[in-house]
Image (cartoon, rainbow, N blue to C red):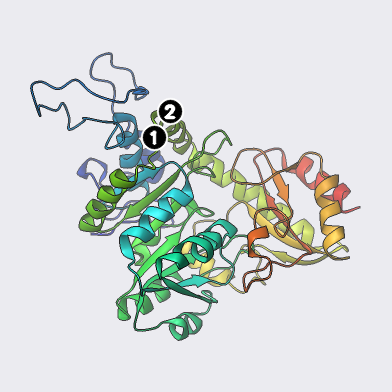
Amino acid sequence: MRSGTTLSGTLRSVPMSDRYTSQHFETLAIHAGNTADPLTGAVVPPIYQVSTYKQDGVGGLRGGYEYSRSANPTRTALEENLAALEGGRRGLAFASGLAAEDCLLRTLLSPGDHVVIPNDAYGGTFRLFAKVVARWGVEWSVADTSDPASVRAALTPRTKVVWVETPSNPLLGITDVAAVAQIAREAGARLVVDNTFATPYLQQPLALGADVVVHSLTKYMGGHSDVVGGALIVADQELGEELAYHQNAMGAVAGPFDSWLVLRGTKTLSVRMDRHSENAGKVADMLTRHARVTHVLYPGLPDHPGHEVAAKQMRAFGGMVSFRVQGGEEAAVEVCNRAQVFTLGESLGGVESLIEHPGRMTHASAAGSALEVPGDLVRLSVGIENVDDLLSDIQQALG
C-alpha cells in the first residue's frame, strides 16, 4: 500500500513499519528508525563501525547481521527512516546517488530495453545513460516530462522505465507525477522519480503513483555538505527485495558513519526545508526585478509554467533557483565569480548557499547533446542564512 502526506503533513496510510502509522512528518523524521540503544538507553543510534559479527554457532545470526556489506545496524536505521519519510515499503541506502541509480537500472533493465529520460536531466544521470547504460544494449530517448503528451510520444513497446526529475536540475522543470505515472502504468513501464530537489517533506512521489524514488542523500537529506550518499525507496516489497539482492551483490552500500550523518540530517529536514523555501522565494522575487536578469526559473513564481502543478503536488517550492543573465556565458561566469556569501561550488542542499555555472560545472558532460544547458544560466542553492545578506550578495554580484 502506498502512503504519503497531505499538505498538513499527516500520514494517511501504512508505511514500512506499522509503528509509524498516523504520525506527522516532523515526528517521523526524528523517531523512525531511531530506536534507543537496548544496552545503554542512548537515544541516538550508535555508529556500528564494524565489518563482521559474532555468530552464536554456525549460522546463528544476531538480528540477521553477518557482514556489513549485506547489512549494518546503522544503515538499517537510516533505511527504515527513509522508507517512513517517503511512505514506502523498503528503503535502501547507497554510497552515492549515482550508485543508487546504477543499482536500480541494473535491476530493472536488460539488453534491448528502452528508457525515457528528461530533456533536462542532471548531468551525472545523463552521463550514466549516455556512457554506461548504452553499453549494455539499453536504448534511451529524451522527452519533455513537463508535457505528458511528450512522454507518451517517447514510449516504445520496449520501454521499461520512465525517469523523472521534479523539480529538475538545473532548469527547475515540473512534472505532473500522477499524470505521468498513469501513462507509464498503461505502457507497462515503471516510473522512477528523482526527489532530490523536493525531498519527502515537500513532495511524496510514491503517494502520487511512482514506483521508485531516487535520492542523492548528499543534498538536502544530509543537509550539511559533509556526506555523500544515495537512496532508493520503493512502494512494492517484492521490488524492494530484488533491489536489496542487487545492492548486496554490487556492494556500493552506505557506510556506517555516512548513514549516521544522513540520519542526523533527516531529523531537521522539515525545519531546514521551510527556511530554504522561504529564502529561495525571496531571492527569486528579487531576481525578477533585476535589470540584468533575463529569466528566472523557480516553480514558486506564478508565471512559471509548472507553478500550478507544483502547488498541487508540493508543500512548498524548495530552495533551488536558476536564472539567466544578460550578456551571455561570460557574464554568467562573472556573476558566479563575484559572489561572496554564496560559495562558488558544485552540489546543493547544504545549509550554506552555493552558486555555480551549470554549463561549465555540473552539466558540462551534457555539452553538445539534447540536454545541453544555456550558457547564460546560473544556478543557486539558497541556504538558510539571513535572507537580507543573500539578497545583498546576489545584487552586488550582478553589478
Q: Are marks 1 and 2 in contact (CB under 8 Å)?
A: no
Q: Residue 298 in the image: state x and y as whole percent.
A: 65, 62
Under tag 2, what secondary structure? helix
Foreground of the two, 289 or 233: 233
Looking at the image, tell me whether mark 1 or mark 2 is earlier in sequence order: 1
In this view, 293 is above or below 384? below
Up/down of 170 relative to 17, above or below: below
Q: Is residue 148 left or right of residue 58?
A: right
**For this view, does 211 lie left or right of residue 125?**
left
Residue at mark 1: 30
Residue drawn at (46%, 86%) of the image: 153
Q: Look at label 1 and name its amino acid.
A: Ile
Q: Indicate the position of residue 351 as horizontal and vertical percent values.
A: 62, 38
Identify whether 4 is placed above or below 29: below
Disc 1 versus disc 2: distance between alpha carbons?
18 Å
In the image shown, does 97 or 249 lie closer to the viewer? Answer: 249
- In this rendering, the count of numbered labels is 2
Pointer 2 local density, CA inside 10 Å: few below 14, some 14–19, many at least 20: some
Q: Quadrant of residue 256?
A: top left
In the rendered image, the residue lying farthest to the right is 399
Q: Residues within 10 Å of mark 1 (few under 14, many from 20)?
A: some
Q: Nearer the viewer, residue 330 or 51?
A: 51
Give how far across and how far down residue 36 sits, in percent.
Answer: 29, 23
Apparent side of residue 197 relative to residue 14 in the rendered image (left or right): right
Q: Amino acid at mark 2?
A: Phe
Q: Residue at x 86, y 46 (%)?
A: 338
- Label 1: element kind: helix
Residue identifier under label 2: 257
Residue 154 in picture, x, y percent from top left: 46, 82
Q: Is residue 181 above or below residue 128?
A: below
